[in-house]
Amino acid sequence: MNNLMWLVRAARWVRNPPSPRMVALVLAVIAIALAIVGLEYFGLWPEWATMERQRGVRLPRP
């Protein structure tokens, strides 16, 4: 059933494709995300911009 929904979505995109501006926006967001991941992977991301991993709030059990 899920495959049928994807086919319907693809048919809708073929009939009414996104504008070139929207495609450029999505590609720009993906490029920025990949650049941030690459900077962090190579250790070039500043320490002040890294979020500390905090444990979730634990509620006491009754």
Image (cartoon, helix red, strand yellow):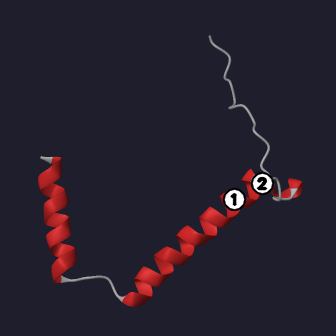
Residue 19 on image: x %, y %? 35, 88
Which amino acid type is shown beneath numbered disc 1? Gly
Q: Look at 68% across and 24% down and name the residue there.
A: 58
- The quarter holding residue 10 reads bottom left
- How much space separates mark 1 and mark 2, taking CA atoms? 6 Å
Which residue carries the number 1 mark? 38
Residue 7 on image: x %, y %? 14, 61
Q: Look at 43% across and 89% down and name the residue there.
A: 21
Q: Look at 75% across and 54% down and name the residue there.
A: 40
Which residue carries the number 2 mark? 42
Mark 2: secondary structure? loop
Mark 1: secondary structure? helix
- The quarter holding residue 54 reads top right
Q: Look at 18% across and 78% down and name the residue there.
A: 14
Which amino acid type is shown beneath numbered disc 2? Phe
- The quarter holding residue 42 reads bottom right
Of residues 28 and 57, the one nearer the viewer is: 28
Q: Is residue 57 left or right of residue 28?
A: right
Q: Is residue 13 left or right of residue 51?
A: left
